[in-house]
Image (spheres, rainbow, N blue to C red):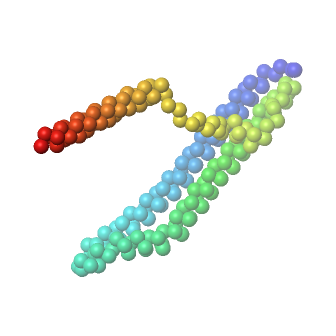
């Protein structure tokens, strides 16, 4: 391994360029999402203003009462294409962002390889997809079946005791009542 005094500076520059490129990607992605949200909001405001105008100009109570149902069916008919376009736009935004990330990391990798080339060291050969696997959250283990905690079991037992006691009291009271009925029958 040959020591080169320019290697640390070249690696620093590669990392700095990666950070700047990622910042630009995030800014562009934010701009795209903001535009998508603004256009959706603008359309919603225009629709609300038109509906409000119809309500204000209506002079018939039956027409006024029918407006919510009409607007519901109208929105089902008319909102599907814009919604589909919004979804396609969102997917396109995400794909463009992912492509930009991939290009940024590939450029960083190439700059790092070039900087390390004179030292005889190499970066591990990891494709971008393998790199992203490390960024994904780990799969959650399935939750075990709910077990009753000792405290919950004790609470259940204490709740069950009063019921049993009240059932025993009720039976005793019922026996006393039936015994008193028998004694009154025998006296007569």
Location of residue 187 in the rendering, given as x and y in whole percent from the top left corner = 13, 39
Residue 112 in view in this figure = yes
Q: Is residue 63 above or below residue 170?
A: below
At horizontal 24% and vertical 77% (from top left) the residue drawn is 61
Q: Where is residue 105, by image quadrant? A: top right
Q: Quadrant of residue 102?
A: top right
61 left or right of 153?
left
Place of residue 32 in the rendered image (x, y in percent of width and height, measured from the top left): 55, 53
Which residue is located at x 41 percent, y 63 percent? 44
Which quadrant is home to the N terminus? top right
59 is higher (above) or lower (below) than 52: below
Closer to the camera in the image, 110 or 74? 74
Q: Is 172 rendered above or below residue 81?
A: above
**Residue situated in front as seen by the camera: 14 or 157:** 157
Q: Position of residue 42 (x, y in %)?
A: 43, 62
Number of dots carrying numbers? 0
Residue 148 coordinates in the image, percent (x, y): 50, 31
Tell me: 139 left or right of 64.
Answer: right
Image quadrant for the C terminus?
top left
Residue 177 is at least partly visible in this image: no
Identify which residue, 51 or 139, lies in the foreground: 139
Specify the quadrant of the image occupied by residue 13.
Answer: top right
């Amino acid at each position: 391994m040959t020591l080169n005094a320019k290697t640390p500076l070249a690696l620093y520059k590669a990392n700095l360029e990666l950070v700047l490129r990622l910042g630009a990607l995030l800014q562009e992605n934010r701009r795209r999402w903001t535009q998508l949200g603004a256009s959706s909001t603008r359309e919603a405001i225009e629709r609300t203003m038109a509906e409000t105008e119809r309500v204000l100009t209506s002079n018939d109570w039956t027409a006024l009462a029918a407006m919510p149902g009409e607007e519901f069916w109208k929105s089902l008919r008319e909102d599907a294409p814009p919604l589909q376009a919004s979804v396609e736009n969102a997917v396109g935004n995400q794909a463009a962002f992912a492509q930009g990330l991939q290009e940024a990391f590939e450029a960083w990798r190439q700059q790092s390889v070039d900087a390390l080339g004179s030292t005889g060291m190499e970066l591990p050969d990891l494709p971008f997809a393998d790199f992203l696997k490390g960024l994904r959250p780990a799969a959650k283990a399935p939750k075990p079946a709910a077990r009753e905690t000792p405290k919950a079991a004790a609470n259940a037992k204490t709740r069950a005791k009063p019921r049993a006691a009240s059932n025993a009291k009720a039976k005793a009271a019922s026996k006393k009542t039936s015994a008193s009925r028998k004694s009154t029958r025998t006296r007569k």
